[in-house]
Image (cartoon, rainbow, N blue to C red):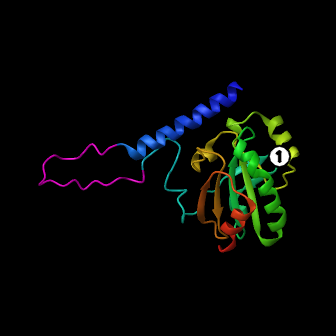
Amino acid sequence: MNKNLLSFAIILLAIAIVVVNFWKPNQTESHNSDQVSQESPSTDEEIPGVDLSQELEGQPAPDFTLTTLTGETVKLSDFKGKKVILNFWATWCPPCKAEMPHMQNFYEGNKENGIEIVAVNLTSMDSGRKEIEAFVQEYGLTFSIPLDEEGNIGMQYQAFTIPTSYIIDTKGIIIKKIVGPMDEGMMESLTKDIE
């Protein structure tokens, strides 16, 4: 329970840092009406360990290599040529629990149609491998579940609120970021019109 509270506190702190960095007032305003500041809000604010420019919609999805519960190596770029739903989740997250049966059903109905689900477990914030294994077994998950044991990939993809998902096209370009749970209909409509 304490680990869950700590994880929740870390997520809230990360969100607060992002909010403060994006909405702080411009302190270079001039009171002289003849002088106009040329500064505009910057979209390249820095958060240690995160390159905000990499996960913007329309940009290539940052590649990563992670290991699954079974020891299999998963590299995101290996899925080029397929549509990918890249999902970030944890076992203690109620919206993640609600979303997983929809993901499994969607995967079973679409895996033969060139659509993959890569559900990255935020292992550094989760309750341990046994909990993850029990979760996977309980929900009958058959898609790829890489483990983000260091927390770097979740941070790189700004998975500050979970579940967070990215829709990636066949060329490896991020088409859409979704914060919050999805159902099968939503997954269908988000993947239907992309190449």
Does 155 sit left or right of 65 as displayed? left
According to the image, label 1 marks what residue? 71
In the rendered structure, which amino acid carries the disc numbered 1? Gly
Q: Is residue 47 above or below residue 119?
A: above
Report whether residue 61 is seen. Answer: no
Quadrant location of the C terminus?
bottom right
- Percent of width and height locating residue 24: 36, 42
Residue drawn at 72 percent across, 46 percent down: 96
The magenta stretch spans residue 41: yes
Q: Is residue 3 above or below residue 105?
A: above
Total labels: the figure holds: 1
Residue drawn at 75 percent across, 59 percent down: 117
Neighbours of disc 1 within 10 Å: few (<14), some (14-19), many (20+)? few
| Magenta stretch, overall SS | loop
- Percent of width and height locating residue 74: 75, 54
Report whether residue 67 is seen. Answer: yes
- Percent of width and height locating residue 148: 69, 43
What span is in magenta?
25-44
Does 64 sit left or right of 49 as displayed? right
- Percent of width and height locating residue 181: 68, 52
Residue drawn at 83 percent across, 70 percent down: 112
Residue drawn at 64 percent across, 46 percent down: 162
For the residue pair 182 and 69, the one nearer the viewer reads as 182
Dot 1: what SS?
loop
Does 55 sit left or right of 77 as displayed? left
For the residue pair 9 and 174, the one nearer the viewer reads as 9
Quadrant location of the N terminus?
top right
From this viewpoint, which residue is outermost toward the top?
2
The magenta stretch spans residue 123: no
